Structure formats: C-alpha cells, structure tokens
Image (tube, rainbow, N blue to C red):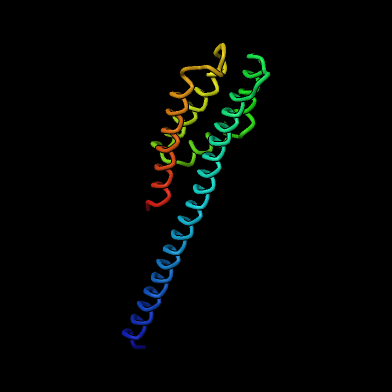
Amino acid sequence: MDWGTLAGTALGAVLGVTTTLLAERSRWQREHSARERAVKQELYAEYLGALSLTTHRLRDLKRSVGLSREERMGQAGEILGSTNAYHLRYQVLIIAPEHLGNMANQAFARVRDLRDRFDEADVCTDPEWASAMAALTEALIALRTAMRADLTSG
C-alpha cells in the first residue's frame, strides 16, 4: 500500500470538509445577520409609528372642544395606552443596542411629558405645550437617526 496516496486522500478529504464547513458557517452568519436586521427594521418602524400616532392623537385631543379637563386627562391616558408604545418600547430595549434603548426611553419620556400636559388646568392655552412638542420632535429625530445608523452598520 502506498502511504503517500492514502495521506493525500485523507488530506484532501479534511480540506474538502473544512472548506465546506467554513462556507456553511459564513452563509449561516449572513442569513442570521439579514434576519436580525429585518426584525430590527420592523420593530423600529412599529415603535416610531406608535410614538408618532400617539403624538398625533394627543395633538388632536388638545384641539378638541367641549371636553372637560377630566375627560381630556382620561382620553390622554387612553391614547398612550392604546397605541402599543409601551409594549414596543420593551421590545426595543431587549433587541436594540444599549445606547439606542436609552434614546428610545428618552423619546417615550417626551411623549409621556406631552401626555402629562393634559394634567394642567387648560391645555388649550398651555404655554409649555410648544416646548414639550419641540423636545419630543428633537428626541424622535435623534432616535430615528440612531435607528437608521444601527440598521446600516455591520
């Protein structure tokens, strides 16, 4: 028996299996990364949508006429609860990098601040409304920018 032929065959088999395993690992990593990015993209879009919908509804509530302060307060709380923002925020905190989670919390806090403006005597003439809206807009822009950067990195 020729040991050279046997060693060459064994070496070829080892190289072939190793190359196949490396190629499969690389393919798996690409697919995993694509799936992770798709999940993040959907979650980020849903969260931003929930925050925007909440903001829109709160603005509409501020403009509505004929409601008592208590009715406005109740509806403001219902609006925040009905848009799924709480649930989505926790998902973002689990999936997103820590710095992005902090920004998601900050944007949510600005939405809550806007909701809390309804606790004032007359939200329709609230002088702090414009600054609360500006802070919320700034937080949403920063969050959207960070989300976009997270989705395009790596």
Q: Where is residue 100 in the image (x, y as percent from the top left)?
A: 41, 38
The image quadrant that residue 72 belongs to is top right
Q: Which residue is drawn at 34% across and 88% down?
A: 2
The image quadrant that residue 51 belongs to is top right
Please name whichever residue, 55 or 5, is drawn nearer the observer in this view of the structure. 55
Q: Where is residue 39 in the image (x, y as percent from the top left)?
A: 52, 49
Q: Residue at x 64, y 31 (%)?
A: 82
The mark tally for this picture is 0
Q: In this view, does 28 lie to the left or right of 61?
A: left
Q: Is residue 75 left or right of residue 133?
A: right
Please name whichever residue, 55 or 144, is drawn nearer the observer in this view of the structure. 55
Considering only vertical position in the picture, is 47 above or below 33? above
Please name whichever residue, 34 or 2, is drawn nearer the observer in this view of the structure. 34
- Furthest residue in direction top, as rendered: 121
Q: Where is residue 25 in the image (x, y as percent from the top left)?
A: 43, 62
Considering only vertical position in the picture, is 44 above or below 113? below
- Furthest residue in direction left, as rendered: 4
The image quadrant that residue 119 belongs to is top right
Q: In this view, does 58 lie to the left or right of 98?
A: right
Please name whichever residue, 62 or 90, is drawn nearer the observer in this view of the structure. 62
- Furthest residue in direction bottom, as rendered: 1
Quarter of the image with the N terminus is: bottom left
Q: Position of residue 89 (x, y in %)?
A: 52, 34
